[in-house]
């Protein structure tokens, strides 16, 4: 028998909210509503600005999870949910990327507490918007690879950056600014030094820094601008390629909503 069955109270739902990259206006309406309606708002204060959760109800408990471990976070969530009240667990970006969603959800399942996920804008998409670029270029690359440099958290050998870079696809590299030279060296094993890279530090925050550089000057760019945590790197081999225009709006291209002109 799980904890929810033992109490006899219908547990409140836990909503994992993707807060987006930092700007409160980039959070979804659904995510904002979950925060507004929650009795407990638990947010990652080291990555999520306090302004994002400022919409919480006046009587809500708003807790920064940065100094807490998994068990401490779950204890707060569990107590609130088993009392029949809702919880907003607020994550930076999108909860599906580099978060602790799986282990948190497993604890909720064990206690019989319902949960759901509200997606958020991830930093790679916010950075692409800031740069005014597209990850996909017709006939050049149609893929985006999201990964990271190996650090304290291991990366499977088959996913080392130099192997992923061999595809020539667009890449968004997270959690790697602390090892500037290692990042440059790893990518340089597969890409030429003139490869365009867009560095987005704290994208959409007031402290935002945006820098174009090349792979050959990447480490220098990182160190000279002090781009540490919360930097995403867009590696864009296709940026210097002309590519081909999209066929979607071509007059001679037919689809289910438009006939081609002869």
Image (cartoon, rainbow, N blue to C red):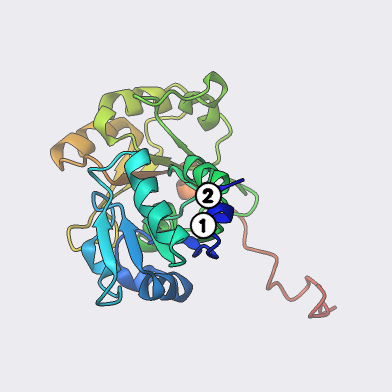
Between disc 1 and disc 2, the foreground one is 1
**What residue is drawn where x is 78% and y is 70%?**
253
Look at the picture and state if 126 lies above or below 251.
above
Look at the picture and state if 94 lies above or below 222.
below
**Marks 1 & 2, CB-CB < 8 Å contact:** yes
The reply to whether residue 224 is visible in this rendering is yes
Give the spatial CA distance, label 1 vs label 2: 7 Å
Seen from the viewer's position, the closer of residues 112 and 53 is 112
The reply to whether residue 121 is visible in this rendering is no
In x, y percent, where is residue 144? 55, 46
Seen from the viewer's position, the closer of residues 67 and 202 is 67
Q: Which residue is mark 1?
A: 7
In x, y percent, where is residue 130? 35, 62
Quadrant position of the N terminus in the picture: top right
Corner quadrant of residue 18 = bottom left
Tag count: 2
Q: Check residue 3 in the rendering and tell me which mark sits there, or answer none.
A: 2
């Amino acid at each position: 028998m799980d904890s929810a069955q033992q109490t006899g109270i219908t547990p409140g739902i836990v909503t994992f909210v993707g807060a987006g990259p930092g700007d409160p206006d980039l959070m979804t309406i659904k995510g904002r509503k979950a925060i507004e309606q929650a009795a407990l708002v638990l947010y990652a204060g080291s990555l999520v600005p306090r302004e994002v959760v400022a919409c919480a109800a006046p009587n809500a408990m708003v807790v920064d999870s940065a100094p807490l471990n998994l068990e401490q976070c779950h204890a707060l969530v569990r107590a609130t949910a088993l009392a029949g009240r809702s919880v907003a667990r607020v994550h930076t970006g999108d909860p599906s990327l580099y978060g602790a969603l799986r282990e948190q959800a497993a604890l909720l399942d064990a206690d019989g507490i319902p949960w759901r996920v509200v997606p958020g804008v991830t930093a790679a998409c916010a950075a692409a918007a800031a740069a005014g670029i597209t990850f996909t270029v017709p006939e050049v690359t149609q893929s985006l690879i999201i990964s990271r440099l190996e650090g304290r958290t291991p990366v499977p050998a088959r996913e080392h950056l130099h192997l992923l870079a061999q595809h020539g696809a667009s890449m968004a590299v997270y959690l790697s600014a602390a090892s500037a030279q290692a990042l440059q060296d790893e990518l340089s094993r597969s890409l030429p030094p003139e490869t365009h890279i867009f560095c987005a530090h704290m994208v959409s925050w007031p402290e935002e820094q945006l820098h174009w550089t090349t792979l050959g000057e990447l480490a220098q760019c990182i160190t000279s601008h002090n781009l540490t945590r919360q930097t995403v790197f867009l590696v864009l081999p296709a940026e210097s390629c002309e590519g081909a225009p999209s066929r979607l709006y071509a007059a001679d291209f037919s689809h289910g909503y438009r006939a081609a002109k002869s």
